[in-house]
Image: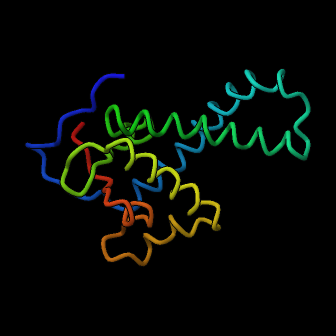
Amino acid sequence: MSTPEAPLQDAPLQIAQLWPRFGAFVYESVLLFGVSFIASWVVVPLLGDAAGGATLAAYRGYLLAVFGIYFIYCWRLSGQTLAMKTWGLRLRRADGQPLTLPVAVGRYVLAVAGLLCIGAGFLWALVDRDRQFLHDRLMGTRILRAPF
């Protein structure tokens, strides 16, 4: 894996508005459908029918791991997933530095937990003073406007 991108030095650290972040979230959902299709194509012949029980739990865990690898890799590499690039967003720590591996993993885990709690971690941005998602607030990360 290549080293993460250098900190944003010349660009002002301006927090992205809420609507582009939610737009990227919707776009990311569409992209994850494709990722899950390919990931399923690889593993379903091995697992067989995942209609319930331990097989379903293993399948769900596998998909969460695949999604985690996708997000953590993108965040560490450039601070952007494909959806974030499209919407002109970049993920950084509060000091403008790229995410470290522990921060990226923690952010992913907290984002999944916030999503599983009826989206409360994302809806938090509606009441947060800086319009930050709960996982960003807790991990000290910011979604910034990125220069195109």
> Left or right of 47: which side holds 95?
left
Where residue 85 sits in the image (x, y, percent)?
A: 36, 37
> Left or right of 102: which side holds 118?
right
> Left or right of 32: which side holds 56?
right
Coloured how?
rainbow
Count numbered badges in the picture: 0
Q: Nearer the viewer, residue 73 or 90?
A: 73
Residue sitting at x 27%, y 27%:
3
Residue 6's place in the image compared with 139, above or below, is: above
Where residue 138 sits in the image (x, y, percent)?
A: 39, 65
Where residue 131 sits in the image (x, y, percent)?
A: 36, 69
Residue closest to the far left: 10
Residue sitting at x 45%, y 53%:
106
Where residue 33 sits in the image (x, y, percent)?
A: 65, 37
Residue sitting at x 26%, y 59%:
15
> Which quadrant of the structure image shows residue 130?
bottom left
Q: Where, quadrant-wise, is the C terminus in this rendering?
A: top left
Residue sitting at x 33%, y 53%:
143
Q: Where, quadrant-wise, is the N terminus in this rendering?
A: top left
> Left or right of 141: which side holds 71?
right
> Which quadrant of the structure image shows residue 7?
top left
